Structure formats: C-alpha cells, structure tokens
C-alpha cells in the first residue's frame, strides 16, 4: 500500500498532497479543540502502535501474510482528527526513516491511509454503531465494520491515483478489481484485529475509547478504623 | 486471478523485507538502529538542508521522462557518490532497499500487459510499453529508496524530527512524532519482552492456529504500551513538562552548509537541464 | 495554631477506570518536615494514594491539599506549581525514565524549572554523584540493570529539589550498600517525606511516624516503633518483622 | 562419577548489542536438587546471566548446558525442550505477563505443554492458590498492584512445573507475609533452584550455597553461611547484612 517514488507522476502527487494538507489542517483544528493533558501522547502512542502492528504480520492463508493499516482502529480509539495526524506521522516516519513509501509520494500515501482509511473507516463505524444497540460489544462490531471497509476504501484511493497519474499499463478496471478484491480479504484480517484490539481496550480501559461514552462509577466510602 | 496472486505476493514480500529489517537487531533504539554512526560531511550537515536536498533530488528524478536513460545513470552515480561519501556500507544500502520489493513484483508483471509493440524474450511475449513502464517504476523507485536510505543512515531520528520541525511541521504533529519516537522503543521492547515471555513458556508462532494468540497479544500490547505511555507521560508532567522537550538552539546555518547540502539536487538539476537542451 | 500541613488528604476515594475501587475514604495529614512511612499489604492502595499527591490521578471524591493548595486536575496552573513542589519516585523505574540518555533524563526536571547551562550541568552531575551513577551519564536508561534504573529514577527526582519527596518502594532491587547509601541521602535531606515500603526495618530507620493502609483505608497511624511493636496490628495487615529483628 | 549437572556454564562471555560487555567468562556448575543464591551488586550481570539459562540471550562465547543438553539458540527443537525444563521468573513482572487475564496467563505455559480441559483448570487453580491470588483470576494482570503482579509472575512459572527454577529477585516488592509464604513454597519444592537476590537473610534461609557475581565474573562460590560471615568479601561486593542481623 505504500506507494514508492515514480509510480504516480508529479502533478497528480502534488494535487493529492494539497488535498492531504487540507485534511491535516482540518484535523489539527479539530484535535486542538478536544485537546487535554493527555491527547498528544495518546495520539503519539496510537502512532507507535500502528507502526508496531504494521510490522506484526499475521498469516492470511497458505504461507502468505498481511499487515494492519490501522486507520479505523485509530479513529475509534482517539477520534478521527487525532487519528489522521497520527497516521500522517507514521507515514512521515516510515518514509523518512525506513524508505517505506516514496518521499515524493507521501501526499498520496497520507491521502489513502490517513484520510480515506481513517475517515471512511470512522464513517462506517458511526453508521454501524447507530443501528446497533448501545452496549460495549456493539462498539467492537462497529469498529470491525469500519476496519473491514477502510482497507478497500484506501485501496480505491490508490486506484484513483493510478487512473489519473500512473505510467503503468494495467487497465484501470483490472487494477480496481484486483486491488479491491485482495484488500477486502486483507480487510477481513484488519476487521478481526481491529475488533479484538478495541474489544481488549473496551474490556479494561473503556475510558480510552473515543467512540464510547463512559459513565462514571459510584464510589463507596468505608469507615476508618 | 493472476492479479490476486500478485497482490498476495506483494504482501509476502513486505513481510519478508520487514523480517530482514528487524530480525538481527534486537533491543536497540529504533532511531539508532537505522542511523549508522560515521564521521562524514553528510553526517555533519544539519537535518533540514539535507531533507530539502533529498526532496529536491527525488522530485528531479521523478520529473525526468523515463526514456532519458542517461539521466538516470547520472542520478545513480550521484546518489552513490553521496552514499560513499557518507561511508555507508553498500551492503546495508542494498539490503535496506529491499523495502521496495513489493513494487518490484508489480513491475515485473507489467510487461505482460499493455498494448502496441511486442518483443519476445525467451518463451515470453512482452509488451514494449509495459517494459518501459516497469523500468520506470524500478528505476525511479530505486533511486527514491536509495536517497531516503542515505538520508536516514546519516541522520538520527531525533535530528530528522528537528529538521522537520524547522521545515514548519505543525507543533502538534512534532509532539506526536516525538512521543512516537520515544515510545517506539518502549513498544518495541514490550513486544520483544512479550515474545521472550511467550517463548520461555513453550510457544512458537507457526501458522493460522496461532492467530488467536497473536491477536490477543496485539490487544494486550496496545493496552500495555498505552498505559506505559500514559504513566511515563504523567511522570513527565510530574517533572514540569509543558510540551516542549529540552534542546539547544542550533546556530544559524552558513551559506556553505546550504551549498554543500544542495550540491546533490543542483547536480541532478544540471543533468536534467543539459538533457533538456539535447531533447528539445 | 499549627501552620498549614504539607499534605492534607481528606476522605479520598478512588476507582480505576475498569471499575476497581482502590481507595475507600482515606485521611492523612502530614506536617512540614515530617518523615512518614506508608505501610500496608500488596494491593492495599499505597501506589494509588501516592498518585493522588500531585494530581496524576484526579481527585474523584474527597480532597487533597499540598501546602494549603488544593490539588485539582482541572486547574492546570496550580497543578504545575504543585508538581514543582512534590517529587515522586515511582515504584517502577521504567515509568520514570524516558529521555534518550541518563544525563538528559536527570536534566529534564530542572530544565523545565528554568535551569540552563552550567547551573543545569552542575545539578545533573551532583545528582548522578549522589546515587553513584556518574559513569552512566551518556547511557540510555533502558539499557541499564534494574537496580541501576532505580538509582537513576531517584536521582531524577532529587535533582528537582522538591519540598515534598514521595518515594514508592525506593529500596527494592537495590543492592544492600546502595540501600544504605540511599538511606543516608534521605536522612540528610531536610524535607517532608512520604515513603512507601515493605521493608519495616528501613521504615524504622528513616521515619519517626508510620501509617498503615489496608484495603483502601487507613488502619493505623502513629509512632513507627510503637506500630512495629504491635504484633497483632502487623499480623492483621500482612506485615512481619524479619526473623531475628526486634524493635 | 557424578551425574550430569542440572546446569553447567563454562567461560560464558556476553556483550549487549550496543557494545556493553556484561559477562567476562563466567563458570558455574549446579548439581541436581541444589538451591543456589546468586548474589552481587547492581549491574553485576546477574540478570544477564539468568537470561542465558534458557537461551533468551544466545550464547555468544563459552557454553551453557541444561541437564546435559547444550543451549543453542539456533537449534529450535532443543531450545523448546530446554524451555520446558527451565522456568524463569523475571525480575520485572511486566516482562512475564502478557495475556488479557491472570488465569489465561497462568494457563499459557501448561497449555503449550499439551495440558487441556479439567487438568489445565486444576493446574491454574493450584498455582493461583499457592500464591494467594485466586480471586484475581479474571483480572487483567497489568491492572494489579506491583506486588500482586510479582505473585502472578511466580505462579505462571510454578504452573509449568519446571525441573530448574530460576528466580530473579522474587521477593522484591512483596509484603513481608507474601515474602515468607513464597519462601515456604520454594522450600517445599524439590527442584534445582537458582535465586538472584539482594536480600541476604532470604538467601541464607533458602539456599545452602551462594555464588557472588561481580563485574561480570564469579568472585565467590561456597556455603551461604560461610560467605555471609566473610565481611571483607561482602564489603568488596557492595553486600551488607542488615543492621542487627548475624549469621
Ligand atoms: N491500573 C489499574 N486498574 C485497575 N485496578 C488497579 C490498577 N492498578 C492497581 N489496581 C488495583 O487497585 C488496588 C490497589 O493497588 P495499588 O497499586 O495502589 O496497591 P499497592 O498498595 O501499591 O500494592 P503493592 O505493595 O503491591 O505495590 C489493587 O487491588 C489493584 O489490583
Ligand atoms: N539492554 C542492555 N543493553 C546494554 N547494556 C545493558 C543492558 N541491560 C543491562 N546492561 C548492562 O549490563 C550490565 C549487567 O546488567 P544486569 O542487568 O545483568 O545486572 P544485574 O546484576 O542484574 O543488576 P541488578 O541487581 O541491578 O538487577 C550492567 O552494567 C548494565 O548496565
Ligand atoms: Mg504499589
Ligand atoms: Mg538484574
């Protein structure tokens, strides 16, 4: 999913870089509003986690494996604004430190994974959460749906960029069907891990989940001996 | 169907390359891990001119039409000269370049598709158009990767961040990134610790049946890192942290520093300009 | 008419986000200059209580005051001033150390308090010397042994010269000589101190007064020697003096 | 003609990836059934040595044998069998616990060794009872107090019924009663045991034999009481008996 240099031409890259920059500016404004003592480090941690699980490969079938994108997961946990920022930071670091994803293609990659993946996944999450009953397991299910869809959505972003600015020769429809087809499979993996992770967080630290409103528990007072 | 297979292969390749990257480093600082400490002109340059130089160079490469083969030869020589000046072992350079393997697969399939002229290579009929496109992806991608690697082996992660900050990356993102760099070690250590803990108790991940354990591990890892980070952050607040990490103000850069840093893109642009002249 | 106490905790209750209640109404008043040992069994709530002393855990119920100033997680300004007064050494040194090198880690607090240049360097060097870790100044903290990390953790807090020093099991994982050296350092400081410990002789050595927290409430408060002589009280709270030791 | 030793370490040297050498040629031979205390100052290399005993740190120089079997990080099969024999309780309980609940964490090892169903459940319950943590079975381990985590960490290893038990400062952060209870448990086990500790009376109580590691080499090996009587030796290695304690 990390597009290298030279795969998409410069004008297209520039257009998407501008679009990404707009989305980032919007997210910055949104994140500042909900900022408290803890949000920057939490977004940083989400970034680390996404970075880490992108390395944690999981077997898909007969010897093959995939990795998480983490957009929907981040959105459910820290909110879509901070999630876009976190994903952007991850992609910047991957590009600058690991040469993973071309430096001239960062705008493209941010657009696919940090904007489409995050906001698409979050939108699906919100929709699904709306139709489900209001309880803890619904959050995991909605997150799974978000994760499932976020991957092919990001893949569609790739196909659009390919259609506009690629020098390659595969027909757009072939690329579309292949990308979306495989990414739905990968999306299943993403959905499972997103659900399990959100479930794990819900189980012990539901206060950390952005997509869930916590009710404060009642405190009991015991007599001092 | 064939595409499906390819795409799966891309993911396998990604996996492989990440194994290559991580397996023999263990418990190291992720920043240190990529950085190779040497004394060289390239290392001594501050980060932000280096970042600008790398970006300009890459833009030049990407902007060059793919049929101008000699230009690319020139670019290759340029980036290798920089890498050698930075005393980066060529083996490291090329091992790390494996990061682009997924797209190499993509590129290798390309000549089988397309329209127009066909060339026969052994048993295969290849489309010329596809061949050229594939070569483009390979060449430009490789140059981009080599540039980024040269940058990251000669610049520590912290310097890189400082550089990006100088280049006006928004403060909130700098903060997120600096937390990320700090915690990437924490998470990495926690991951390593959990792996050690699992293996000490007779566990070895081999396939699909271990999905559950690995997924649970991911969940636990998240909470662990989250909470560790939370506690560490609270510890930082306890010591008066206000969002700005201590640092020394660096001196203003002289013209010669900029010139040295920009030598790479300037040379590349010169090559491009000359070839533009030829091609008009 | 007594002066304002250094630390005043009234009716403090707290539950963790997962619903586990750890404190059930704790009262504690510590005067300026007192050294108090906070004793109690595993899981009693000692660490949870400590985390309230500078607003790391927001006060959910009851109140906490430091030198007359209310600890209020919402008031950022007052929190900042409280945090410059209360220095906490955490139970787990990994929670405390976060900078890339030991030297930078120790410099962190004083830097945030406005120290710079030679003054900062001197503070760092002093703190390192105090805990015997001078040679490790340029090493990354997470590449140290557990006991070494503990010593650095103590140094990071000492370097801030807090008015109230709170230590959560500072002596665990220290070799016996370091343990004694730490005791000497602590004794030499003329500040209010709260020390959580499972090492009763250590508590006796350093603190005139002890309190026992058990199941989230204070069950005893008094002279350390008196408390350690009360076998029944100790036994009820899973405390025991080491074999061969008597007060 | 002695039988094969439980643990044989010869000339073991090791440097961390950052170039820090921690072990400089360590020799140690432990017979079956022996209980050995591993003493030494902070940073001596104790934890590093322990991590060699089941191949967590690959043997870089020298050799390590467990019950006659060479510890070789490359031989995955033999490593697996070694790890089922050697149970290590890490110094930091956070290094040990990783499953979402305490019960699952304890079940993890026995499950990998093929235990299932009622047998597995019984093992888990026994281990929990042994360390007094039965009520915490369904709690996440990282939401326990430090001392509680330490107890669970011990339980995870006991549940595997190892032939050789290696404990890295098992008693630190335990309340005095737990500390004694742990001693009772350890004494009741009839296995080879290596225990790293800074608590010399604890070493004396549990181990007939002690070795002192200092600066990455073994500087003493002998009867615990003898070693603890040697003031000069202790002093040279930053070890001291608590005030008021005599062997
Ligand atoms: N993060 C957490 N989430 C939920 N419960 C917690 C958390 N941390 C601690 N607890 C619980 O709160 C209670 C008090 O824990 P605390 O850490 O304050 O004990 P402690 O007195 O410091 O014990 P120790 O001597 O073992 O360090 C314990 O029952 C513990 O299980
Ligand atoms: N991950 C690491 N990377 C580099 N050096 C390390 C690392 N861990 C430990 N060291 C160094 O190796 C030496 C031995 O450390 P080790 O942890 O084995 O000591 P120890 O005897 O267990 O000490 P303690 O009693 O404090 O636990 C120390 O000098 C320490 O600084
Ligand atoms: Mg505690
Ligand atoms: Mg150790």
Image (spheres, coloured by chain):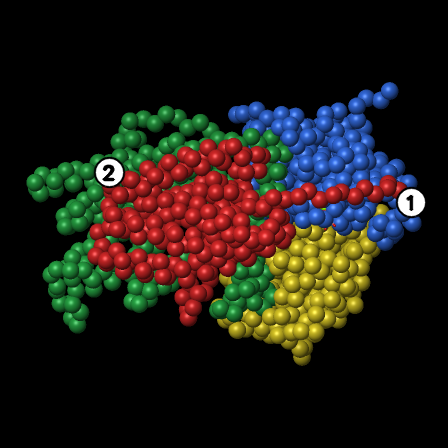
Chain colours: A red, B green, C blue, D yellow
Q: Name the element at disc 2.
A: helix
Q: Is residue A191 above or below residue D242?
A: below
Can you see residue C202? no
Please give the chain letter of the residue carrying mark 1.
Answer: C
**Marker count (numbered):** 2
Q: Position of residue C122 (x, y in %)?
A: 58, 28
Q: Position of residue D13 (x, y in %)?
A: 54, 59
Q: Nearer the viewer, residue A223 or B140?
A: A223
Question: Mark 1 Cα within 10 Å, few/some/many (few <14, many 20+)?
Answer: few
Q: In the figure, residue C31 lies in which quadrant?
A: top right
Q: Nearer the viewer, residue C118 or B127?
A: B127
Can you see residue B127? yes
Residue A13 placement, left or right of D102: left
Q: Which residue is mark 1?
A: C229
Q: Which residue is mark 2?
A: B265
Please give the chain letter of the residue carrying mark 2.
Answer: B
Q: Position of residue C110 (x, y in %)?
A: 59, 29
């Amino acid at each position: 999913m990390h597009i290298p240099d030279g795969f998409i031409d410069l004008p297209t890259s520039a257009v998407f870089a501008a679009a990404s920059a707009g989305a980032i500016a919007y997210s910055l404004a949104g994140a500042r509003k909900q900022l408290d003592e803890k949000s920057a480090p939490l977004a940083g941690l989400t970034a680390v986690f996404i970075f880490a699980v992108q390395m944690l490969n999981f077997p898909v079938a007969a010897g093959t494996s995939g990795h998480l994108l983490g957009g929907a997961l981040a959105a459910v946990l820290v909110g879509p604004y901070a999630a876009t920022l976190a994903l952007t930071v991850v992609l910047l670091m991957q590009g600058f430190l690991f040469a993973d994803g071309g430096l001239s293609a960062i705008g493209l990659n941010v657009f696919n994974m940090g904007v489409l993946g995050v906001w698409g996944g979050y939108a699906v999450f919100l929709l699904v959460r709306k139709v489900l009953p209001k309880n803890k397991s619904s959050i995991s299910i909605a997150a799974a749906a978000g994760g499932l869809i976020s991957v092919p959505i990001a893949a569609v972003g790739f196909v659009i960029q390919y259609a506009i600015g690629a020098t390659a020769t595969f027909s757009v429809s072939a690329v579309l069907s292949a990308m979306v087809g495989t990414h739905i499979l990968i999306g299943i993996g993403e959905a499972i891990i997103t659900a399990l992770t959100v479930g794990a967080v819900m189980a012990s630290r539901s206060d950390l989940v952005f997509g869930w409103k916590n009710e404060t528990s009642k405190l009991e007072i015991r007599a001092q001996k | 169907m064939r595409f499906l297979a390819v795409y799966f292969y891309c993911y396998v390749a990604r996996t492989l390359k990440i194994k290559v990257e991580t397996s023999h480093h263990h418990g190291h600082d992720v920043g240190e891990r990529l950085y190779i400490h040497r004394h060289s002109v390239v290392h001594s340059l501050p980060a932000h001119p280096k970042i600008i130089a790398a970006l300009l160079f890459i833009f030049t490469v990407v902007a060059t039409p793919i049929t101008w083969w000699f230009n690319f030869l020139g670019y290759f020589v340029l980036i290798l000269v920089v890498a050698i000046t930075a005393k980066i072992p060529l083996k490291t350079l090329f091992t790390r370049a494996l990061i682009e393997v997924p797209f190499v697969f993509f590129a290798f399939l390309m000549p089988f598709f397309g329209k127009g002229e066909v060339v026969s290579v052994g048993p295969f009929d290849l489309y010329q158009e596809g061949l050229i496109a594939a070569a483009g992806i390979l060449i430009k991608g490789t140059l981009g990767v080599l540039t980024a690697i040269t940058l990251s082996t000669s610049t520590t992660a912290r310097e890189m961040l400082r550089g990006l900050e100088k280049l006006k990356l928004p403060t909130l993102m700098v903060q997120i990134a600096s937390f990320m760099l700090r915690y990437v070690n924490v998470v990495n250590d926690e991951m390593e610790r959990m792996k050690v803990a699992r293996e000490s108790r007779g566990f070895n991940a081999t396939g699909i049946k271990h999905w559950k354990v690995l997924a649970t591990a991911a969940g636990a890892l998240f909470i662990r890192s989250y909470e560790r980070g939370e506690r560490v952050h609270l510890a930082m607040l306890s010591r008066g942290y206000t969002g700005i990490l201590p640092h020394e103000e660096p001196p203003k850069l002289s013209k010669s520093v900029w010139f040295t840093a920009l030598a790479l893109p300037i040379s590349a642009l010169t090559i491009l300009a000359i070839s533009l002249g030829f091609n008009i | 008419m007594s002066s304002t106490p250094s630390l005043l905790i009234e009716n403090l209750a707290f539950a963790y986000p997962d619903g586990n209640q750890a404190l059930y109404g704790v009262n504690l008043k510590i005067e300026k200059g007192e050294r108090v040992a906070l004793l109690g069994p595993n899981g009693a709530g000692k660490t949870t209580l400590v985390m309230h002393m500078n607003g790391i855990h927001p006060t959910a119920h009851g109140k906490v005051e430091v030198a007359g100033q209310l600890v209020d997680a919402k008031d950022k300004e007052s929190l900042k001033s409280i945090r410059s007064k209360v220095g906490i050494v955490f139970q787990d040194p990994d929670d405390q150390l976060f900078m890339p090198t030991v030297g930078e880690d120790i410099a962190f607090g004083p830097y945030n308090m406005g120290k710079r240049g030679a003054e900062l360097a001197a503070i760092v060097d002093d703190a390192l010397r105090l805990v015997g870790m001078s040679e490790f100044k340029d090493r990354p903290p997470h590449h140290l042994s557990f006991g070494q990390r503990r010593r650095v953790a103590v140094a990071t807090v000492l370097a801030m010269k807090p008015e109230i020093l709170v230590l959560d099991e500072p002596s665990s994982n220290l070799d016996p000589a370091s343990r004694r050296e730490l005791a000497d350092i602590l004794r030499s400081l003329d500040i209010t101190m709260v020390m959580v410990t499972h090492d009763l002789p250590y508590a006796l050595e350093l603190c005139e007064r002890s309190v026992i927290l058990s199941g989230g409430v204070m069950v005893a408060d008094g002279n350390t020697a008196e408390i350690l002589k009360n076998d029944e009280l100790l036994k009820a709270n899973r405390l025991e003096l080491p074999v061969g030791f008597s007060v």
